[in-house]
Amino acid sequence: MSNLSLRERDAAAIAQIGKLRFSPLSVVGGKGNRLIEEGGRSLLDLSGSAGPAILGYGHPAIVEAVEGSIRDMAGASLLLYPNEPAVSLAERLLAITPGDGERRVWFGHSGSDANDCAVRVLRAATGRSRFISFIGSYHGNLSGSMGISGHTAMTHTLPRAGVVLLPYPDPYRPKFNGEDVLALLDYQFETTCPPHQVAAVFIEPLMSDGGLIVPPPGFLKALQERCRKHGIRIVVDEVKVGLARSGMMHCFQHEGLTPDLVVFGKGIGGGLPLSAVVGPKEIMDHAPAFALQTTAGNPVATSAGNAVLKTIESEGLVERSARTGKLFSEALRTLGEKHEIIGDVRGRGLAIGVDLVKDRATREPVAATTTAKIIYRGYELGAAFSYVGLKANVLEFMPPLTLTEGEVADGIAIIDQAIADVNAGKVSDADVASFMMW
Ligand SMILES: *Cc1c(COP(=O)(O)O)cnc(C)c1O
């Protein structure tokens, strides 16, 4: 066993279905905004482990909160008894999440179970069984959350019966603009999808895994108005882009939305398994036994959640993510002046996508191998990042919000070099053959 590498042991022991691997990186530790790989080399983390590492690795606030809560553990579940960290976290979430009337918070372990809970409770509480969601959207990997997702990597599972998937308007490749999509929705309402049967619309305020797509201004607001008219609830999935990442506390605030339900995940646990749904009391309290999960809301995970929210406040991370994100995006656009492959740089705050193209005029996406090669070379040069997009052509940058300006400069130098080296043919197809995911 001991002479095998961590990667070899992983390949022999862990199911492929729970992995998206983009590079040979295998991790033995982490400190600040850096990951330590087997052998001891440290890499700059521009991925945030796909989002949860909102404060990087080993942040003192999280370490202290987790150590304290596990040493004197206030039970191990929220089912039978309330515990202080869970109740405090719920109070904090209610305080930072805009919304009218009496609201309640539900806790889970992942973005998947949170969206799953929202689907089931909305259906039961409203008596309506249809949902609206988007092609390209990713809401999770449990049957309920998968059933309202529209990612092309998930065509092995059919959408839930009654789900209408609309195109998400993409300003860079405008196959459908916002008005087209709203017209399609109206047509659905007039024909096969009577609006009074629709429980809710699920919205990613910035489509993340579908390709870091920022919707055209005003589109989501118009969608919200269309739906509200028919009593359709608005669910905003903030799992990946919420809690300061976008440069505002909530990403939906950029579009002036007023959601009924807000779904949190990833960053809220700072790396521990934690998710939450905030919504109207009459929906969230519809009936007991809707989404019971024994260890959800346990005091260790919720202590980490409290530490995350306190640190966002104490370190001014909303403002910092806006500032660092602007710096990072501007530097990426500057790289675009010398690298033709960079077709578009977009995002909000520290949720940034770089759309790679074969040709700037046609905007034709590069082959997935090209994206993979840049990630592979980035790994060799000392930075971790990954890709998203329905054509696997969008580099995703979701770094810890604690990223420093110096680290932005280091990251940019690596990305610059990685693109140049791939152009020069320094990475072969064989090098990336085992890292072709999504
Ligand atoms: C990752 C993600 C989810 C699912 O969260 P998990 O913690 O992986 O279950 C849901 N919605 C969005 C927008 C996501 O990015």
Image (cartoon, grey):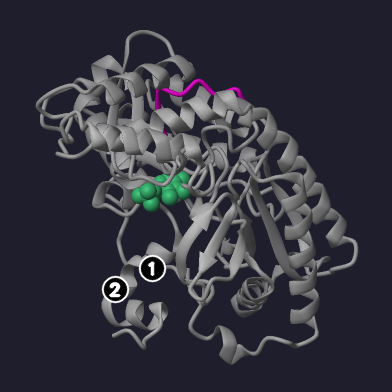
User: Looking at the image, which residue is at 64% across and 72% down?
Assistant: 371
Marker disc for residue 14: 2
Image location (x, y in percent) of residue 204: 50, 40
- Residue 318 visible in the current orientation: yes
Image location (x, y in percent) of residue 61: 47, 34
166 and 352: which one is in front?
Answer: 352
User: Looking at the image, which residue is at 65% across and 44% down?
Assistant: 350
Q: Is residue 389 left or right of residue 263?
A: right
Q: Is 386 above or below relative to 176?
A: below
Tag 1 secondary structure: loop
Image location (x, y in percent) of residue 3: 36, 88
Q: Say if mark 2 contacts mark 1, CB within 8 Å.
A: yes
297 and 232: which one is in front?
Answer: 297
Q: Quadrant of residue 336?
A: bottom right
Pointer 2 or 1: first along the chain: 2
Q: Amino acid at mark 2?
A: Ile
Count neighbours of disc 1 (C-alpha within 10 A) and say few if under 14, some if 14 to 19, many if 20 or more: few
- Kindly report the distance in space between the C-alpha atoms of the residues bearing marks 2 and 1: 9 Å
Residue under circle 1?
Answer: 19
Image quadrant where one finds the N terminus: bottom left
Mark 1 Cβ inside 8 Å of ligand 1: no
Q: Is 202 above or below relative to 366?
A: above
Q: Quadrant of residue 300?
A: top left
Which residues fall within the magenta stretch?
255-264
User: Looking at the image, which residue is at 73% across and 87% down?
Assistant: 426
Q: Amino acid at mark 1?
A: Lys
* In magenta stretch: residue 308: no
